Image (cartoon, rainbow, N blue to C red):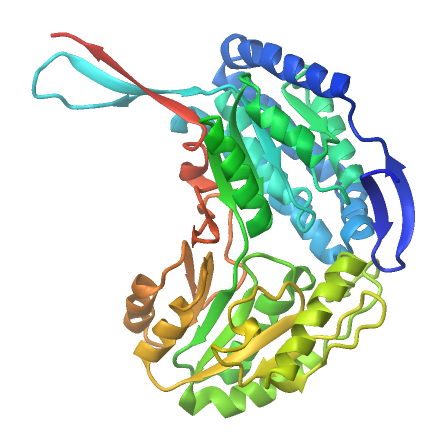
Amino acid sequence: MADYAVTNPATDDRVADYPTATAADIEQALAGAAKSFHAWSRDVDVAERATRLARVAELHAERREELAGIIVREMGKPVDQAREEIDFCVDIFRYYADNAAAFLADEPIDSPAGGSAFIRRQPLGVLVGIMPWNFPFYQVARFVAPNLALGNTILLKHAPQCPESALALERLFVDAGLPEGAYVNLFATNDQVAEVIADPRVQGVSLTGSERAGAAVAEQAGRHLKKVVLELGGSDVFLILDTDDIASAVEMAVAGRLGNNGQACNGSKRMVVMDHLYDEFVERFAAAMAAHRPTDPTVDGATLGPLSSASATRNLQHQVQKALDQGAVLRAGGADPEGNFFAPTVLTDVTPEMDAYREELFGPVAVVYRVASEDEAVALANDSPYGLGAIVVSRDEQQALRVADRLEVGMVFINEVGGEAAELPFGGVKRSGFGRELGRLGIDEFVNKKLIRVKA
Protein backbone atom coordinates (compact mmCIF):
# COMPACT_ATOMS: atom_id res chain seq x y z
CA MET A 1 0.00 0.00 0.00
CA ALA A 2 1.34 3.44 -0.94
CA ASP A 3 2.47 5.85 1.79
CA TYR A 4 0.74 8.76 0.03
CA ALA A 5 -3.01 8.40 -0.36
CA VAL A 6 -6.24 10.38 -0.15
CA THR A 7 -8.72 8.88 2.31
CA ASN A 8 -11.90 10.92 2.70
CA PRO A 9 -12.35 11.21 6.49
CA ALA A 10 -16.10 11.82 6.15
CA THR A 11 -16.58 8.38 4.61
CA ASP A 12 -13.28 6.59 5.30
CA ASP A 13 -13.16 5.76 1.58
CA ARG A 14 -9.66 5.50 0.13
CA VAL A 15 -9.91 7.70 -2.95
CA ALA A 16 -6.48 7.54 -4.59
CA ASP A 17 -2.92 6.31 -4.08
CA TYR A 18 0.30 7.99 -5.20
CA PRO A 19 3.71 6.36 -5.63
CA THR A 20 6.47 7.12 -3.15
CA ALA A 21 9.60 8.74 -4.58
CA THR A 22 12.43 6.51 -5.72
CA ALA A 23 16.07 7.18 -4.92
CA ALA A 24 16.44 8.52 -8.46
CA ASP A 25 13.51 10.90 -7.91
CA ILE A 26 15.13 12.24 -4.74
CA GLU A 27 18.46 12.82 -6.45
CA GLN A 28 16.78 14.54 -9.39
CA ALA A 29 14.90 16.83 -7.01
CA LEU A 30 18.04 17.74 -5.07
CA ALA A 31 20.04 18.39 -8.21
CA GLY A 32 17.25 20.46 -9.74
CA ALA A 33 16.76 22.61 -6.65
CA ALA A 34 20.50 23.20 -6.29
CA LYS A 35 20.84 24.16 -9.94
CA SER A 36 17.78 26.41 -9.82
CA PHE A 37 19.07 28.23 -6.73
CA HIS A 38 21.83 30.00 -8.61
CA ALA A 39 19.50 31.19 -11.35
CA TRP A 40 16.60 32.09 -9.03
CA SER A 41 18.73 33.99 -6.51
CA ARG A 42 21.20 35.71 -8.86
CA ASP A 43 19.69 35.98 -12.32
CA VAL A 44 16.15 36.83 -11.13
CA ASP A 45 16.19 40.03 -9.06
CA VAL A 46 13.91 40.65 -6.11
CA ALA A 47 11.48 42.73 -8.18
CA GLU A 48 10.95 39.88 -10.62
CA ARG A 49 10.69 37.31 -7.84
CA ALA A 50 8.00 39.52 -6.31
CA THR A 51 6.15 39.58 -9.62
CA ARG A 52 6.12 35.79 -9.71
CA LEU A 53 4.83 35.65 -6.13
CA ALA A 54 2.06 38.06 -7.05
CA ARG A 55 1.09 35.63 -9.80
CA VAL A 56 1.10 32.78 -7.25
CA ALA A 57 -1.39 34.81 -5.22
CA GLU A 58 -3.57 35.37 -8.29
CA LEU A 59 -3.61 31.68 -9.12
CA HIS A 60 -4.67 30.80 -5.58
CA ALA A 61 -7.58 33.20 -5.99
CA GLU A 62 -8.48 31.91 -9.45
CA ARG A 63 -8.41 28.27 -8.31
CA ARG A 64 -10.07 28.93 -4.95
CA GLU A 65 -12.93 26.45 -5.36
CA GLU A 66 -10.71 23.70 -6.74
CA LEU A 67 -8.13 24.04 -3.97
CA ALA A 68 -10.76 24.31 -1.24
CA GLY A 69 -12.40 21.13 -2.52
CA ILE A 70 -9.09 19.29 -2.20
CA ILE A 71 -8.75 20.38 1.43
CA VAL A 72 -12.25 19.13 2.27
CA ARG A 73 -11.63 15.82 0.58
CA GLU A 74 -8.24 15.18 2.20
CA MET A 75 -8.79 16.27 5.80
CA GLY A 76 -12.48 17.10 6.29
CA LYS A 77 -12.31 20.86 6.82
CA PRO A 78 -15.73 22.57 6.41
CA VAL A 79 -15.78 24.08 2.93
CA ASP A 80 -16.26 27.68 4.07
CA GLN A 81 -13.15 27.38 6.25
CA ALA A 82 -11.28 25.75 3.36
CA ARG A 83 -12.07 28.78 1.19
CA GLU A 84 -10.85 31.05 3.98
CA GLU A 85 -7.59 29.09 4.07
CA ILE A 86 -7.02 29.79 0.39
CA ASP A 87 -7.89 33.46 0.93
CA PHE A 88 -5.23 33.63 3.64
CA CYS A 89 -2.70 32.17 1.20
CA VAL A 90 -3.55 34.94 -1.25
CA ASP A 91 -2.86 37.52 1.47
CA ILE A 92 0.48 35.93 2.38
CA PHE A 93 1.87 35.76 -1.16
CA ARG A 94 0.70 39.30 -1.88
CA TYR A 95 2.25 40.54 1.36
CA TYR A 96 5.70 39.23 0.48
CA ALA A 97 5.35 40.31 -3.13
CA ASP A 98 4.59 43.85 -1.93
CA ASN A 99 7.22 44.02 0.80
CA ALA A 100 10.14 41.82 -0.24
CA ALA A 101 12.20 44.63 -1.75
CA ALA A 102 11.92 46.74 1.40
CA PHE A 103 12.63 43.78 3.68
CA LEU A 104 15.75 42.85 1.72
CA ALA A 105 17.17 46.35 1.29
CA ASP A 106 20.66 46.92 2.69
CA GLU A 107 20.61 47.88 6.37
CA PRO A 108 23.22 50.58 7.18
CA ILE A 109 25.16 50.47 10.46
CA ASP A 110 26.49 53.63 12.10
CA SER A 111 30.14 53.15 12.99
CA PRO A 112 32.22 55.51 15.16
CA ALA A 113 35.31 54.34 13.28
CA GLY A 114 34.13 56.08 10.13
CA GLY A 115 33.80 54.59 6.70
CA SER A 116 30.62 52.63 6.04
CA ALA A 117 29.10 49.31 7.00
CA PHE A 118 25.87 47.60 6.19
CA ILE A 119 24.04 44.28 6.42
CA ARG A 120 23.08 42.66 3.13
CA ARG A 121 20.49 39.90 3.31
CA GLN A 122 21.15 36.98 0.97
CA PRO A 123 19.55 33.53 0.58
CA LEU A 124 21.11 30.38 1.98
CA GLY A 125 20.25 27.89 -0.76
CA VAL A 126 18.05 24.81 -0.92
CA LEU A 127 15.56 24.44 1.94
CA VAL A 128 13.44 21.47 2.96
CA GLY A 129 9.87 22.05 4.13
CA ILE A 130 8.03 19.30 6.03
CA MET A 131 4.37 20.24 6.21
CA PRO A 132 1.29 18.89 8.04
CA TRP A 133 -2.20 17.91 6.96
CA ASN A 134 -4.31 20.34 9.00
CA PHE A 135 -3.66 23.43 6.84
CA PRO A 136 -2.30 21.90 3.63
CA PHE A 137 -2.06 25.20 1.71
CA TYR A 138 -1.68 27.86 4.41
CA GLN A 139 1.22 26.13 6.17
CA VAL A 140 3.07 25.87 2.87
CA ALA A 141 2.40 29.52 2.04
CA ARG A 142 3.85 30.90 5.25
CA PHE A 143 7.08 28.91 4.79
CA VAL A 144 7.44 29.20 1.04
CA ALA A 145 6.41 32.81 0.30
CA PRO A 146 9.18 34.61 2.24
CA ASN A 147 11.85 32.14 1.21
CA LEU A 148 11.05 32.27 -2.49
CA ALA A 149 11.02 36.07 -2.23
CA LEU A 150 14.45 35.91 -0.63
CA GLY A 151 15.83 33.66 -3.38
CA ASN A 152 15.96 30.27 -1.65
CA THR A 153 14.65 27.21 -3.47
CA ILE A 154 12.29 24.69 -1.91
CA LEU A 155 11.96 20.92 -1.58
CA LEU A 156 8.53 20.30 -0.05
CA LYS A 157 7.46 17.10 1.68
CA HIS A 158 3.76 17.19 2.40
CA ALA A 159 1.83 14.99 4.82
CA PRO A 160 1.13 11.53 3.36
CA GLN A 161 -2.63 12.15 3.46
CA CYS A 162 -2.33 15.32 1.34
CA PRO A 163 -0.83 14.22 -1.99
CA GLU A 164 -3.53 15.98 -4.02
CA SER A 165 -2.73 19.27 -2.29
CA ALA A 166 0.96 18.68 -2.91
CA LEU A 167 0.52 18.15 -6.64
CA ALA A 168 -1.89 21.07 -7.01
CA LEU A 169 0.66 23.38 -5.37
CA GLU A 170 3.55 22.17 -7.49
CA ARG A 171 1.49 22.74 -10.63
CA LEU A 172 0.46 26.20 -9.39
CA PHE A 173 4.07 27.35 -8.91
CA VAL A 174 5.02 26.12 -12.37
CA ASP A 175 2.03 27.93 -13.88
CA ALA A 176 3.08 31.10 -12.04
CA GLY A 177 6.35 31.09 -13.97
CA LEU A 178 8.83 29.86 -11.38
CA PRO A 179 11.84 28.18 -12.98
CA GLU A 180 12.14 24.42 -12.90
CA GLY A 181 13.56 23.34 -9.55
CA ALA A 182 12.57 26.45 -7.60
CA TYR A 183 9.73 24.53 -5.92
CA VAL A 184 9.78 20.73 -6.01
CA ASN A 185 7.30 18.34 -4.41
CA LEU A 186 8.70 15.22 -2.74
CA PHE A 187 6.59 12.15 -2.00
CA ALA A 188 9.35 11.01 0.33
CA THR A 189 9.46 8.61 3.26
CA ASN A 190 10.81 9.72 6.64
CA ASP A 191 14.05 7.84 5.97
CA GLN A 192 14.43 9.59 2.63
CA VAL A 193 13.84 12.97 4.27
CA ALA A 194 16.61 12.22 6.76
CA GLU A 195 18.94 11.56 3.82
CA VAL A 196 17.85 14.80 2.14
CA ILE A 197 18.54 16.80 5.32
CA ALA A 198 22.02 15.27 5.47
CA ASP A 199 22.78 16.21 1.87
CA PRO A 200 25.31 19.08 1.68
CA ARG A 201 23.21 20.83 -0.97
CA VAL A 202 20.48 21.46 1.64
CA GLN A 203 21.00 24.47 3.92
CA GLY A 204 17.96 24.50 6.18
CA VAL A 205 14.79 22.74 7.30
CA SER A 206 11.37 24.00 8.38
CA LEU A 207 8.86 21.64 9.99
CA THR A 208 5.32 22.21 11.13
CA GLY A 209 3.96 19.17 12.90
CA SER A 210 4.03 17.10 16.05
CA GLU A 211 6.44 17.44 18.92
CA ARG A 212 7.84 13.98 18.16
CA ALA A 213 8.46 14.82 14.50
CA GLY A 214 10.03 18.13 15.46
CA ALA A 215 12.46 16.46 17.87
CA ALA A 216 13.49 13.94 15.22
CA VAL A 217 14.03 16.57 12.53
CA ALA A 218 15.88 18.91 14.91
CA GLU A 219 18.22 16.04 15.83
CA GLN A 220 18.88 15.27 12.17
CA ALA A 221 19.42 18.93 11.30
CA GLY A 222 21.70 19.51 14.29
CA ARG A 223 23.80 16.50 13.42
CA HIS A 224 24.51 18.09 10.04
CA LEU A 225 24.66 21.72 11.25
CA LYS A 226 21.59 22.85 9.35
CA LYS A 227 19.39 25.76 10.44
CA VAL A 228 15.91 24.59 11.51
CA VAL A 229 12.59 26.29 12.27
CA LEU A 230 9.95 24.33 14.18
CA GLU A 231 6.25 25.07 14.70
CA LEU A 232 4.96 22.25 16.87
CA GLY A 233 2.06 21.51 19.17
CA GLY A 234 0.15 23.83 21.42
CA SER A 235 -2.30 23.83 24.31
CA ASP A 236 -3.29 27.47 24.11
CA VAL A 237 -5.13 29.16 26.93
CA PHE A 238 -8.26 31.30 26.66
CA LEU A 239 -8.17 33.49 29.78
CA ILE A 240 -11.38 35.23 30.84
CA LEU A 241 -10.31 37.74 33.45
CA ASP A 242 -13.17 40.22 33.35
CA THR A 243 -16.13 40.82 31.07
CA ASP A 244 -19.57 42.36 31.17
CA ASP A 245 -20.58 40.40 28.06
CA ILE A 246 -20.36 36.70 28.90
CA ALA A 247 -22.26 35.79 25.73
CA SER A 248 -19.53 37.37 23.60
CA ALA A 249 -16.82 35.60 25.59
CA VAL A 250 -18.59 32.28 25.05
CA GLU A 251 -18.91 32.95 21.32
CA MET A 252 -15.18 33.71 21.07
CA ALA A 253 -14.28 30.62 23.10
CA VAL A 254 -16.36 28.35 20.86
CA ALA A 255 -14.78 29.86 17.74
CA GLY A 256 -11.32 29.45 19.22
CA ARG A 257 -11.95 25.81 20.05
CA LEU A 258 -13.90 24.55 17.02
CA GLY A 259 -12.04 26.24 14.17
CA ASN A 260 -10.56 23.69 11.74
CA ASN A 261 -12.57 20.96 13.50
CA GLY A 262 -10.56 21.69 16.64
CA GLN A 263 -7.39 20.58 14.87
CA ALA A 264 -5.23 23.69 15.05
CA CYS A 265 -1.99 23.96 17.01
CA ASN A 266 -3.03 27.42 18.18
CA GLY A 267 -6.65 26.49 18.95
CA SER A 268 -7.96 27.52 22.37
CA LYS A 269 -7.80 24.21 24.23
CA ARG A 270 -7.72 25.37 27.87
CA MET A 271 -10.37 27.82 29.13
CA VAL A 272 -9.17 29.55 32.29
CA VAL A 273 -12.01 31.50 33.92
CA MET A 274 -12.14 33.73 36.99
CA ASP A 275 -14.24 32.38 39.83
CA HIS A 276 -17.02 35.00 39.65
CA LEU A 277 -17.64 34.16 35.96
CA TYR A 278 -16.97 30.42 36.02
CA ASP A 279 -20.39 28.90 36.70
CA GLU A 280 -22.24 30.99 34.13
CA PHE A 281 -19.47 30.51 31.57
CA VAL A 282 -19.41 26.72 31.93
CA GLU A 283 -23.18 26.46 31.57
CA ARG A 284 -23.32 28.67 28.50
CA PHE A 285 -20.14 27.33 26.94
CA ALA A 286 -21.22 23.68 27.25
CA ALA A 287 -24.59 24.50 25.67
CA ALA A 288 -22.97 26.47 22.85
CA MET A 289 -20.46 23.71 22.11
CA ALA A 290 -23.20 21.06 22.10
CA ALA A 291 -25.20 23.13 19.61
CA HIS A 292 -22.52 22.55 16.97
CA ARG A 293 -23.06 19.11 15.51
CA PRO A 294 -20.47 17.63 13.13
CA THR A 295 -21.89 17.28 9.65
CA ASP A 296 -21.04 16.92 5.95
CA PRO A 297 -18.08 19.30 5.44
CA THR A 298 -18.95 19.89 1.77
CA VAL A 299 -22.14 21.78 2.67
CA ASP A 300 -22.00 25.58 2.73
CA GLY A 301 -22.48 26.83 6.27
CA ALA A 302 -21.09 23.71 7.99
CA THR A 303 -19.14 24.68 11.10
CA LEU A 304 -17.77 21.30 12.11
CA GLY A 305 -16.73 18.31 10.02
CA PRO A 306 -15.04 15.00 10.81
CA LEU A 307 -11.66 14.55 12.37
CA SER A 308 -8.92 14.11 9.82
CA SER A 309 -8.57 10.33 10.03
CA ALA A 310 -9.60 7.20 11.86
CA SER A 311 -6.32 7.22 13.79
CA ALA A 312 -6.90 10.81 14.92
CA THR A 313 -10.38 9.83 16.09
CA ARG A 314 -9.12 6.82 18.05
CA ASN A 315 -6.44 8.89 19.73
CA LEU A 316 -8.80 11.65 20.84
CA GLN A 317 -11.40 9.11 21.96
CA HIS A 318 -8.74 7.42 24.11
CA GLN A 319 -7.63 10.75 25.64
CA VAL A 320 -11.17 11.81 26.56
CA GLN A 321 -12.07 8.42 28.03
CA LYS A 322 -8.87 8.36 30.05
CA ALA A 323 -9.65 11.83 31.44
CA LEU A 324 -13.11 10.64 32.48
CA ASP A 325 -11.68 7.49 34.04
CA GLN A 326 -9.25 9.65 36.02
CA GLY A 327 -12.04 11.82 37.44
CA ALA A 328 -12.74 14.63 34.95
CA VAL A 329 -16.37 15.79 34.77
CA LEU A 330 -18.15 15.69 31.41
CA ARG A 331 -20.23 18.80 30.69
CA ALA A 332 -20.94 18.17 26.99
CA GLY A 333 -20.16 15.58 24.33
CA GLY A 334 -18.16 12.49 25.20
CA ALA A 335 -15.85 9.82 23.87
CA ASP A 336 -18.34 8.10 21.55
CA PRO A 337 -17.82 9.37 17.97
CA GLU A 338 -19.86 8.34 14.95
CA GLY A 339 -17.23 7.33 12.44
CA ASN A 340 -14.78 10.23 12.47
CA PHE A 341 -17.46 12.72 13.54
CA PHE A 342 -16.56 13.72 17.11
CA ALA A 343 -19.14 15.71 19.08
CA PRO A 344 -17.86 18.93 20.73
CA THR A 345 -16.82 17.98 24.24
CA VAL A 346 -16.33 20.01 27.42
CA LEU A 347 -14.44 18.72 30.46
CA THR A 348 -14.05 20.30 33.89
CA ASP A 349 -12.39 19.32 37.17
CA VAL A 350 -9.19 18.28 35.42
CA THR A 351 -6.32 18.27 37.92
CA PRO A 352 -2.52 18.28 37.45
CA GLU A 353 -2.42 14.57 38.28
CA MET A 354 -4.47 13.73 35.16
CA ASP A 355 -2.89 13.13 31.76
CA ALA A 356 -5.30 15.58 30.10
CA TYR A 357 -3.84 18.41 32.17
CA ARG A 358 -0.65 18.41 30.08
CA GLU A 359 -1.69 16.71 26.84
CA GLU A 360 -2.64 18.46 23.62
CA LEU A 361 -6.25 17.50 22.78
CA PHE A 362 -6.31 17.74 18.99
CA GLY A 363 -9.99 17.93 18.17
CA PRO A 364 -13.19 19.63 19.39
CA VAL A 365 -12.49 19.06 23.10
CA ALA A 366 -12.07 21.87 25.66
CA VAL A 367 -11.04 21.79 29.30
CA VAL A 368 -12.35 24.57 31.58
CA TYR A 369 -10.49 25.60 34.74
CA ARG A 370 -11.63 27.81 37.63
CA VAL A 371 -9.17 30.32 39.14
CA ALA A 372 -9.53 32.81 41.99
CA SER A 373 -6.97 35.46 41.05
CA GLU A 374 -4.90 36.93 38.26
CA ASP A 375 -1.78 35.31 39.69
CA GLU A 376 -3.47 31.90 39.76
CA ALA A 377 -4.65 32.37 36.16
CA VAL A 378 -1.13 33.17 34.97
CA ALA A 379 0.39 30.28 36.93
CA LEU A 380 -2.09 27.78 35.47
CA ALA A 381 -1.63 29.16 31.96
CA ASN A 382 2.15 28.77 32.22
CA ASP A 383 1.95 25.30 33.77
CA SER A 384 2.21 23.61 30.39
CA PRO A 385 5.01 22.12 28.31
CA TYR A 386 3.71 24.19 25.38
CA GLY A 387 4.02 27.90 24.70
CA LEU A 388 2.44 28.77 21.37
CA GLY A 389 -0.29 31.37 21.90
CA ALA A 390 -2.97 32.73 24.22
CA ILE A 391 -6.15 34.78 24.15
CA VAL A 392 -6.86 37.19 27.00
CA VAL A 393 -10.35 38.60 27.60
CA SER A 394 -10.64 41.64 29.86
CA ARG A 395 -12.44 44.99 29.98
CA ASP A 396 -9.28 46.46 31.51
CA GLU A 397 -6.66 46.86 28.78
CA GLN A 398 -3.90 47.51 31.31
CA GLN A 399 -4.76 44.27 33.10
CA ALA A 400 -4.77 42.40 29.79
CA LEU A 401 -1.39 43.84 28.82
CA ARG A 402 0.03 43.06 32.26
CA VAL A 403 -1.08 39.43 31.99
CA ALA A 404 0.09 39.17 28.38
CA ASP A 405 3.56 40.23 29.52
CA ARG A 406 3.65 37.38 32.06
CA LEU A 407 2.50 34.59 29.74
CA GLU A 408 5.18 32.17 28.51
CA VAL A 409 3.99 32.06 24.90
CA GLY A 410 5.00 33.38 21.50
CA MET A 411 1.74 35.20 20.72
CA VAL A 412 -1.01 36.90 22.73
CA PHE A 413 -4.30 38.17 21.30
CA ILE A 414 -6.36 40.46 23.51
CA ASN A 415 -10.17 40.36 23.16
CA GLU A 416 -9.82 38.72 19.75
CA VAL A 417 -10.08 35.29 18.16
CA GLY A 418 -8.64 34.56 14.73
CA GLY A 419 -6.41 37.62 14.71
CA GLU A 420 -3.62 36.01 12.69
CA ALA A 421 -2.56 37.96 9.59
CA ALA A 422 0.16 37.90 6.95
CA GLU A 423 2.00 40.81 8.59
CA LEU A 424 1.96 39.31 12.12
CA PRO A 425 4.77 36.89 13.12
CA PHE A 426 3.67 33.38 14.13
CA GLY A 427 5.57 31.04 16.43
CA GLY A 428 6.04 29.81 19.97
CA VAL A 429 8.41 28.90 22.79
CA LYS A 430 9.08 25.88 24.99
CA ARG A 431 7.91 22.64 23.36
CA SER A 432 5.88 24.54 20.78
CA GLY A 433 9.07 25.07 18.82
CA PHE A 434 11.26 28.01 17.83
CA GLY A 435 11.66 30.47 15.00
CA ARG A 436 9.03 32.70 13.43
CA GLU A 437 6.97 32.66 10.26
CA LEU A 438 5.01 35.46 8.59
CA GLY A 439 5.55 39.19 8.95
CA ARG A 440 8.92 40.91 8.79
CA LEU A 441 10.46 38.19 10.97
CA GLY A 442 9.42 35.41 8.59
CA ILE A 443 11.87 36.46 5.90
CA ASP A 444 14.74 36.69 8.40
CA GLU A 445 15.04 32.99 9.31
CA PHE A 446 16.81 31.31 6.38
CA VAL A 447 19.01 34.23 5.43
CA ASN A 448 22.68 35.15 5.42
CA LYS A 449 22.89 38.54 7.15
CA LYS A 450 26.20 39.40 5.56
CA LEU A 451 28.23 42.28 6.99
CA ILE A 452 30.01 44.43 4.40
CA ARG A 453 32.45 47.00 5.78
CA VAL A 454 34.24 49.73 3.77
CA LYS A 455 37.25 51.33 5.45
CA ALA A 456 37.26 55.11 5.87
Classify 438 as above or below 385.
above
With 197 as the anchor, is 380 left or right in this view? left
* Image location of residue 368, percent across then percent down: 53, 80
Classify 35 as above or below 296.
above
Q: Residue at x 48, y 65 (%)?
A: 416
Where on the picture, by quarter, is residue 36?
A: top right
* Image location of residue 34, percent across then percent down: 59, 13
- Looking at the rendered image, the quarter that the C terminus falls into is top left
* Image location of residue 191, percent across then percent down: 67, 32
- Looking at the rendered image, the quarter that the N terminus falls into is top right
Q: Is residue 335 visible?
A: yes
Classify 260 as above or below 175.
below
Q: Residue at x 50, y 9 (%)?
A: 42
Q: Residue at x 78, y 57 (%)?
A: 309
With 399 as the anchor, is 414 left or right in this view? right
Q: Residue at x 56, y 86 (%)?
A: 282
Classify 346 as above or below 359.
below
Nearer to the camera, 416 or 380: 380
* Image location of residue 335, percent across then percent down: 74, 77
Nearer to the camera, 71 or 189: 189
